[in-house]
Image (cartoon, rainbow, N blue to C red):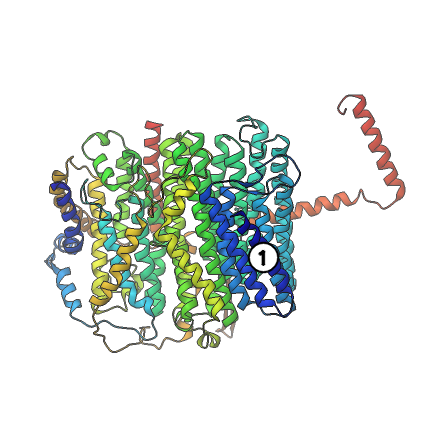
Amino acid sequence: MSGATVAGGMAQVVGGVVLAPLLPGLVQHLKARLQGRRGPTPLQPYRELRRLWGKSSIDVEGTTAVYRLAPLVVVAALAVAILLVPAADRAPGWGVGHDALALAGLLALARFAVATASWDVSNGFSLQGASRDLTLSVFIEAVLVLALAVAALVTGTTDLRGVIAGTAGGDVWSSPALALGAAAFALVVIAETGRQPVDNPDTHLELTMIHEGPLLEYGGRDLAFLQWGAAVRHWLVLVLIAQVFLPHPEGTWWQLALLPAWLVVLCAALALTETILAKSRILIVPRLLGVAAMVALLGIVAWLVENA
Amino acid sequence: MIFVLLAGLVVLGVGAVAAAAPGAFATGLRLQAAGALALGIAGFWALTDGAIWGASFTSVLTPHFGVDALTGLFLGTLGLIAFPALVFASAYLQPTGPGRATGLLTGAFVLALAGVLCARDALTFLFFWELMTLVPAAIILVGGSDQGARRSVFVYVAITHIGSAGVWVSLLLLAREGAIGDASALADGSGVQGVVALAAIIGFGTKAGVMPLHTWLPRAHPIAPAHVSALMSGVMIKVAMYGLVRVLVEWLGGPPVWVGALVLGLGMLSAVGGVTYALFKHELKRLLAFHSIENVGIILLGIGACLLLRARGADEWAAFALAAALLHTVNHAVFKALLFLGAGAFQKTVGTLELDRLGGLLRRMPWTGATFLVGAAAIAGLPPLNGFASEWLTLQALLRIPAYGGVLDGVLGAAALAGLAATAALAVFCFVKVVGLVLLGPPRRHECEEATDPPGPMRFGLAFLAATCVVLGIAPGVLFSQLVGLAPWASPEPARPGLSLPTTGGLPTTGIAVFLFLLVPLLWLSRGSRRAAPSPSWASGQPLTPALLWTSAGFTKPLRLVLEAVLRPEREITVRSHGGVVQEVSYSGRVPQLADEWLYRPAARHALSAARWARRLQTGRLGTYVAYLIALVLALLVSVRIGILG
């Protein structure tokens, strides 16, 4: 195993497990600055995790193992996803593969766990959030797979290491395919991170919650697990967009060196969209995602016209 | 091993007869289960062995029987489903008159299914094919012949018979051309090839419940007894897939591109349409029946991808696509049988399958509930279970259509890719709803509160199928490597537990499963033991009364609103007020079946008016009929004279 592979693996695990909460923290911090507030430091999510870790969990009356296991299943699924998504074009095998399409299954497992748990507590607000989340997931998953398909077609493989290597450098940008895929994937990023215009992460009104709704009944370490999970989702999609759909250099070391810069830029971009866009009506969001699907399909058509 | 197969068939027959006798009812069903087990072992043996037992396929019309690897796969699946289903049935059925008749007919049904699979000539195939259609109809009528059941059976028999005309046409044409078992007999691109392909797609597609030919399926499957529903959804519609693979992939040589495109398009329609309508069904077995349509669609996506890739010369991936379709066939058989048997257990205990009137059953029926949960997660395509593996493979195969194809089929492949991704997400949505309403939350009626697990044999059937879901999810590669060799142009891959295909990142299912199964207990330990005082679920400060519980319709409402333009849901709100005060508000809503309204109802209307017109010919007067005969003879003479005939 070469030094670059070890470094790639380290970046992947340390970044995904330890540094992930920094990403939503950074978005919140930058957003506050953009809005003229001082806001919390980027380290705020760690403080919240520490506070929650010290509190006791709550077993809601009448619930079963489904409710209790859900946060753990979310963490397990996302931990496997961290191993699945490499931080650069080299990464150790980890025994879970690096396949782009397998990612969709792991994200679905996390979603299934949370949504069944909201049935277990039978809290109306939880279920409302779960039902909206699942409705949007139908469109998000289609866009996610189509966008990844664009990258897979351009590079000729669905192995994410190969995809990152294949989209490195400037040559791939001579065709519009990858740019169209990037535009579609940008919407996946916004939806998976629960940002405006899809969802409002700051809302305290249960009726408007999507991703936060199903977490309402959780407390203590359970909630800490789930908040960590939300941060890991940021890590996964931001790393993917940075290393696949945005220009990145060839060579593992250069890719790893540039990744933090891209992540900061992307967090700033999320803060900016959060600031300038309002949350759209839930029924409008599928149309938005439908447009993204069409854009990704256009990317595939562009690739086909060039190569068929 | 052929003796195991024959012994299995004999034991099945003996068991069927014994089940009809009052004293030996349970023994008979257990004998049938043993026979089915032998059938399954022999089938999977034939698959791995690759040898041909008995006759090969022939275009001669005298009875021939035999087994090859593909038959072995489907026989193995039949055994894999029929064994637990029959063990389940031995406790599920009552030894009353109708129960004993059902026991007898179940054995006959399994034998008919095995007959279709082992037939090696067109006529034997068609004989058992018709038998396979009629026996479940008889089972349903034996179970309860109220007005609704009779009507459903009529629709089932009528539609599958009209559809099976396609099977007759395709098989007899193939036999005429000497193409049964011989891929080189039909010229590529010839008219006969096109007709055979189209007839086969219509014929087998109707039996498989492919949209828009599906309308009988959600009517007939739910009213059968649970174990028969499991066999119908798990195996019978798969036998149609078997026929389709035989005709389109094996015997047709190299069919033109449009055949693959048509299969792919129908697959996409069935997958997305089936799961969407399933979401808006509020009765468990009807919902499961719609999921059968969805999964047949996923299988068709694999077969369509195989045909398109083969037409483009990508033989390696065509074999992978076929293997993906066949793996999903086995997987769907397993989890759908599990879900239908689970539904049967719920119905027996609680007395209803209306989703809004169940609830809280995981706690009260832990065996049934936990196995049902496994089945739900498997059908939703979640790792580390079996549905995930085959859906991943199908996605990979679809991705290769744009990679190897032209612009048009490439776009179709990409659309199918998006469709399958959306289907998977919709299936997650649907089974979150099912799990939530059936297993979780407070019980919604008195019977749910007092529900207990069913007796041992029923639990065994469920646990066996759930374990199969897990095993096939952890090591799908063992089966997959054999299935790759079923394509006539490919050979089996070396066996390994995970899935590893060229130009993919691979799916080491074992590694993923190990990680998931290790992490969850570890995290459980780290969760600690500190608990706050138990608190009720929060409902804005009110007690959580049944009126505040969510319903099936409510949970799916956001999607119904989003898809309003496509689904055209109907709703009716009547407000009755008296003296300016609202007394009563009644609401009813439904999502109509567009295929019924736009295809079947007009077809039935036109058929009836055509029949009314044709009735005028039947005057009942002797003179008229003599005139008809004279006209016929004259017409024949004239046509011979001018050279149309003879």
Q: Give left or right: position of A237 versus B284.
A: left
Above or below — where is B257 with respect to B84?
above
Q: How many marks?
A: 1
Q: Residue at x 47, y 56 (%)?
A: B336
Query: Which percent across, then down, holds residue B81?
Result: 49, 56
| Residue type marked 1 | Leu
Q: Quadrant of the C terminus of chain B?
A: top right
| Residue farthest right in this picture | B623
Question: Residue tagged by mark 1?
Answer: B12
Residue A211 quadrant: bottom left
Above or below — where is A73 with respect to B328?
below
**Mark 1 belongs to which subunit?**
B
For the residue pair B357 and B83, the one nearer the viewer reads as B83
Crowd tier of the residue under label 1, counting other residues whose Cα lies within 10 Å: few below 14, some 14–19, many 20 or above: many
Residue B513 visible in image = yes
For the residue pair B332 and B472, the one nearer the viewer reads as B472
